[in-house]
Image (cartoon, helix red, strand yellow):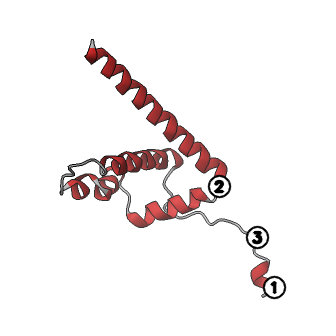
Amino acid sequence: MILSCSSTGAVEKPDNLIKESVMERVLYDIIVLEAMSTFKPKNPDFESVYGKPYIYKKYGIDSLQLVQSDNYYAKFPRIYTRMYSNIQKGMGKVKDSLTELDKLQRK
């Protein structure tokens, strides 16, 4: 029992860790795809074409690698917060662009 309590709490880095910059893009795409999948009417082939298989193929990763990398980064709140902050900024830019495009089309 004493040995189990003396753990240093070190986080083991996975062998196949997705680089932080790539992980940011993966998470961004996952968020966008999840939002798209809520639209009605939904194409029954959406998940097989644009779901997780799309992410895995696009980034050359697999589900285990994604889960391990996400779990690793989640154990470092500063890194994880920075990643999600960057994702939010990117989504804000897209929103601003779409708003501007909408204004131009309404003229």
Distance of label 3 from label 2 (alpha carbons): 15 Å
Q: Amino acid at mark 1?
A: Ile
* Secondary element type, mark 2: loop
Q: Find residue 2 and name its label.
A: 1
Q: Position of residue 53 (x, y in %)?
A: 29, 58
Q: Position of residue 93 (x, y in %)?
A: 45, 29
* Foreground of the two, 9 or 12: 9
Q: Secondary structure at mark 3?
A: loop
Judging by the rendered image, the residue that carries numbered circle 2 is 76
Earlier sequence position, callout 3 versus callout 2 = 3
Residue at 26% across, 17% down: 105
- Residue 18: horizontal and vertical position, in percent? 48, 54
For badge 2, the amino acid type reads Phe
Q: Which mark is residue 98?
A: none
Above or below: residue 98 compared with residue 75: above
Spatial CA distance of label 3 from label 1 is 12 Å
Residue at figure coordinates x 59%, y 57% from the top left: 74
- Type of amino acid under label 3: Thr
